[in-house]
Amino acid sequence: MAETKSGERPHDPKFPEKFLEFMRSGWGPLDLDAAPLPQSAFTARRREALSAAFPGELLIIPTGEEQRRSNDTYYPFRAGSDFVWLTGDQDPEGVLVLHPSGDGHEAVLYRRPRKGTDSDEFFRSAKYGELWIGRKHSLEETEVRLGLPCRDVEGLDEALRGAERSRTRLLRGFDARLDARFERGEAAEGGLTRDGELAAVLSELRLRKDSWELEQLQDAVDITVRGFEDVARVIPSTGSVSERLIEGVFRSRARLEGNGLGYDSIVGAGSHATTLHWITNDGATKTGELLLMDMGVENHHLYTADVTRTVPVDGRFTPLQRQVYDIVHASQQAGMDVIKPGTAFEDIHQTCMRVLAEGLKDLGILPGTVDEALDKDSLIYRRWTLHGFGHMLGLDVHDCAASRPEHYYKGAVQEDFVLTVEPGLYFQANDELVPEELRGVGIRIEDDVRVTADGCENLSDGLPRSSDEVETWLAEQREAGPRIAGAH
């Protein structure tokens, strides 16, 4: 059974009045830091940009609420990316509303107020009570932290009913109650526009990262680099270690220095590396095979890294493994070399794919010519590449995904875009069109790059990329030994 609105559960005890009276007294103040957040000046400018895109319209951007895992337990809450980008707030159940006002908008954050010791919820609610979940910021403290007016979310319905407007836009899919209300057509007197255009504009505004966001992305990448180093130190050159130990060691770094993982870690030993989204991680490393690790840390402000490295378990590539690895590395470098403001996403993609196709031809695998394989009516090379060159990166690992095609994958990169470059070659274990030695080999190299005024900067260059450098790096990490307590 679900909790009541206050967060009480059906099996919670019915306390006697004497106990309730005792619990209501004798509590002193418990202070929390309420200093302005460093990003508050940036979030204000972002709200101004959104306001300018929708003059005279009421805009509603909710963050969502905790999702039930089972019975009365919940998944850890992760705030909505657009909501965080506009507010900096990471608590659940908030709703940002941009009310039309004069030539612009008045932004108001509606959220659940803190219920302190003056409320029985303080000790009775496992979902909201501060004895259960810790001290929360009050509305007044949140206003100071965010630089944004805050009001009780219980007043949201009245605020929406009383607003005079010609059009209302809701970023749907994050608040079931609001979604249901809009489905019933109750929200707008002058007309309702679904969230498609609002979601697209928000995505497009987020494409170019401001200076604060670039700092956060570099922070996430730097933690990720340390996580890869931790992992390298527990991979034995002989014997075996489970994929889940590797997953767990990396997650330890993510929790130690960041908010957690940016996405489920992909740890593919041997033929598991040929499964693009291998997250079962129930295999084990084996001498002579390769290990593909696609992992990223989400930092405390929810910006994520996305990095992939493929290493030889015993420390040295075989000649054929090295040949394939070098093809992938050359493809990645070629893609990075063409990145600069104004370069079309498609041109970066084709540059990487041509190098891969040429490599497949050199391996004696690709039938016909390289040009024939790359022809849009053929694309047979993709049997062994499967995916594109990369994607945008930011608050989401696949960032800005709601952008309209002409602004994203059918458009061009611009300065301060951050994107991944991640070509790969994958030879399935049952692929009879490739030599037996290549079956079950998967190699991907992925880095996070910022587009600069005249090229790009590799944010993840703290990790080696070339085959020789990877071998040297792996040996150095192993010599240093485990670093995180418990990783033996």
Image (cartoon, rainbow, N blue to C red):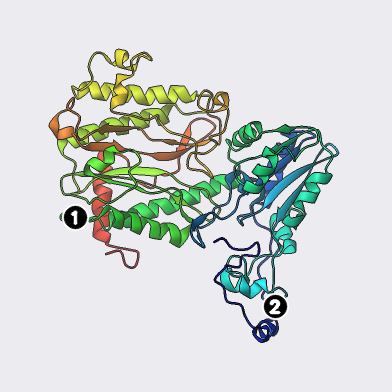
Depth check, front residue: 81 or 425:
81
Q: Quadrant of the C terminus?
A: bottom left
Residue 240 is tagged as 1
Quarter holding residue 235: bottom left
- Which sits in the foreground, 70 or 275? 70
The disc at residue 146 is: none
Kindly state the secondary structure of the residue where label 1 is placed.
Answer: loop
Measured from the top left, where is residue 281 in percent x and y? 30, 50
Element marked by disc 2: loop
Say left or right for 349 vs 44: left
Q: Position of residue 189 (x, y in %)?
A: 80, 36
In-image side of 50 versus 478 (left or right) = right
Say left or right for 378 vs 115: left
Residue 189 in sight here: yes
> Residue 165: where, in percent of width, then height?
82, 37
Three-letter amino acid code at the position of disc 2: Pro
- Tally of numbered discs: 2
Q: Earlier in the sequence, mark 2 or mark 1?
A: 2
Alpha carbon distance from label 2 to label 1: 54 Å
Query: Which x, y percent locates residue 188?
Result: 77, 37
When the figure is inspected, residue 211 is found, relative to residue 375, above or below; the finding is below
Q: Residue furthest left?
A: 436
Q: Residues within 10 Å of mark 2 (few under 14, many from 20)?
A: few
Q: Quadrant of the N terminus?
A: bottom right
Say which of 260 and 179 sits in front. Answer: 179
Please tell me how crowded label 1 is: few (under 14), some (14-19), or many (20+) other residues with Cα within 10 Å: some
Q: Which residue is mark 2?
A: 29
Q: Quadrant of residue 92?
A: bottom right
The amino acid pointed to by label 1 is Ser
